[in-house]
Image (cartoon, rainbow, N blue to C red):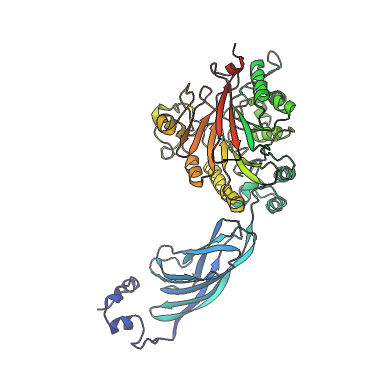
Amino acid sequence: MALSRRDFLKGAALATAGAGVLTGLGLSQGGTQAYADPVGSGSIGLTFDENKWVLAGESVSGRVYSYDIGGTDAFDLTFNYDASVFASVSVFAPQGATILAQHDNGAQLQVVLMVDPEVVDYNNLLTVTVVAASTAGDGSINLVAAKAAKLGGTVELTIIGDGAIIGVRPIDPVSEFTIEALSLAMTFFMVDNTSPRWPDAARFDLNADGVIDIQDFVRIANGILDAASNLRLRFRADGSFKILQVSDYQDYINATNRPNVNARTVALFNRLLDEEKPDLVVMTGDQQGGNMTADLLQEYIRQMMLPCEERKVPWMITYGNHDEDATTALAAGWDKIRQLDYYRSFPCNVNRPTMSGCVEKQGNNTSCVGDMYLFLYDAEGDTPIYNLWALDSNRYRNTTVPDRISRPVPYGSNITGTHYDWIRPAQVDWYYRTSLQIEHRYGKIPSLMFFHIPLLEWTNMWFDGERHGVTGRRGEVECPAYANPGLWAVARERGDVKGMFVGHEHDNDYIGNYHGIYLSYDASIGYATYGGEYKGGKVIELNKADLSTFTTRMIYASDYGLNQ
């Protein structure tokens, strides 16, 4: 019975016994090859297209392609690669191809595959993926040998485009803003978002104007100066480090009847600083709460942060949904990007330039601004032993949210009406990749994460509070992001984030351990905005003796007799 080519490729011929098997495979019973004459010729190559560099620890893929070899059904391919630069090489067969066997000796990978000529795309015979090692360098991967056959006859192949030199560039976890980063950004000068090079260039668009220009270079340069700064936050000699979280200051000033920020808010902030003497203040969003001109916005920020500046207490901010409420200033260019530059101009501010590289503008909303990490060092200032993440939880959505990315309202959470925005997938990816890079260099460093709008996991935790050891007040229903970005799940997988801290709900200050990550609210400090008698700040205390955990205390104005 005659077999079709497709049956042959599927191995049906192997059902024939004895000598018939050998004959079907084109071999004599003695095992010698029964054919020698070529039945065709063509060319084959390996290309990585435009992907000529990769960050340490990341992967990049190329493809094996061919010309003029239609009908070829079997391949034996050999690749050489630099094992000192690439941690591994793997292959994937697309539709119509099947990898039958492969062997990797650490510097050479040999692959045998069969293909279905009626299905396979000969321009994409095989996907080849290299994973960069943790060290920098230039490495090559080449197709060095290729054999092919067609219906039992040899197909002569000429190797073309035999591979690529791929540069592995490091990410310095101490400072992503290096002279090398500036040099790389300069190769994209005046590349804009219409260019095919934009996917590689976009992470350097630090002001989200859609073009790589001198303004972006200036921000990178400032980041370089940050890295060279002697201002390294250190644990105290006794091994402790104290953070004061302050949320929802949410005030404004004007030139007529409100020339100053609320006096009761200032008094509470001063008292918290004097009593607790924190090593760092973290403002977790909604710093502003009303319309102001650009000049008044700057004066407002100066007044708000004066208590820290007067005491020389380091401080940093994350953004909330109200931080572009000064619409007059916003119209004059004072979006969150420009505000961050202004915050960073204060001597005691420790914010870094936006590090996630995914800043975007949608109408009046600016997203992904101020994403960063910040190391805490040992008492000598030599070794990072703890890390702080800051993320922009963004503002509101201007468009209808597709059902496929939303989920049923959990336990009555109030997310109807105004749709709060969510942390972008690109921000989650940035955290994940950067966390890996930090681990590659220093091991897994424990960390805390600060942002403004809670995740849906906060509500889930509250309604199973006994299981999760929830303590503290819930004075109002949670108003989480409208969609779940997966940040908690990714952080749990990574295992470095020990706690997440938010504001947003002024009358909530509860905390619990949600499957290994503490989720915590901070009540508002601001008297110019809504909220009851429970104004205050949250104290977070770390100790070098056991960095796997921490303690928190909520300090209320009433503890100081300031609500009288």
247 over 176 or under it: above or below? above
User: Which residue is rendered at x = 36% and y = 83% of the image?
Assistant: 26
Residue 258 figure quarter? top right
Q: Quadrant of the N terminus?
A: bottom left
Q: Nearer the viewer, residue 480 or 206?
A: 480
Q: Nearer the viewer, residue 473 or 485?
A: 473
User: Which residue is rendered at x = 52% and y = 64% of the image?
Assistant: 89
Q: Position of residue 475 (x, y in %)?
A: 48, 21
Q: Position of residue 163 (x, y in %)?
A: 57, 68
Residue 20 figure quarter? bottom left
- 561 left or right of 454 in image: right
207 over 247 or under it: above or below? below
Residue 525 figure quarter? top right
Direction top: furthest residue: 564
Label tally: 0
User: Which residue is rendered at x = 57% and y = 41% of the image?
Assistant: 547
380 over 561 or under it: above or below? below
Q: Position of residue 521 (x, y in %)?
A: 52, 29
Q: Position of residue 118 (x, y in %)?
A: 38, 68
- 151 left or right of 267 in image: left
Looking at the image, can residue 72 be seen?
no
Q: Quadrant of the C terminus?
A: top right
